[in-house]
């Protein structure tokens, strides 16, 4: 598994606000939320578990 899936890179949201990047899981997250999920590069980014990551990002981690 590539480490870049565990980093949510900085982005600007739809209102033009800048958000700093962060590593997953954050201290406030469940320890299984090891992946960065987002619907596109300018939308809300958040830490998620492997099941949600595969669904949202349309990636198969088992291949």
Image (cartoon, grey):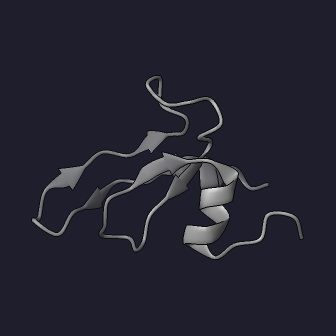
Q: Position of residue 7 (x, y in %)?
A: 53, 48
In the picture, measured across the screen, residue 58 lies left or right of residue 61, that is: left
| Residue occupying image coordinates x 30% and y 45% | 20
Examine the image and state in which quarter residue 45 appears. bottom left
In the picture, measured across the screen, residue 19 lies left or right of residue 35, that is: left
The C terminus: image quadrant:
bottom right
Exactly how many numbered labels are in the figure?
Answer: 0
| Residue occupying image coordinates x 62% and y 55% | 5
Q: Position of residue 60 (x, y in %)?
A: 77, 71
| Residue occupying image coordinates x 62% and y 48% | 49
Q: Position of residue 47 (x, y in %)?
A: 50, 46
| Residue occupying image coordinates x 38% and y 70% | 41
Examine the image and state in which quarter residue 61 appears. bottom right
Q: Residue furthest top?
A: 27
Above or below, 60 relative to 49: below
In the picture, measured across the screen, residue 14 lies left or right of residue 50, that is: left
Q: Nearer the viewer, residue 51 or 16?
A: 51
In the picture, measured across the screen, residue 33 lies left or right of residue 10, that is: right
């Amino acid at each position: 598994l590539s480490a870049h899936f565990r980093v949510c890179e900085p982005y600007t949201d739809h209102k033009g606000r800048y958000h700093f990047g962060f590593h997953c899981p954050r201290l406030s997250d469940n320890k299984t939320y090891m992946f960065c999920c987002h619907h596109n590069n300018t939308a809300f980014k958040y830490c998620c578990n492997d099941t949600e990551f595969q669904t949202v990002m349309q990636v198969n981690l088992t291949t």
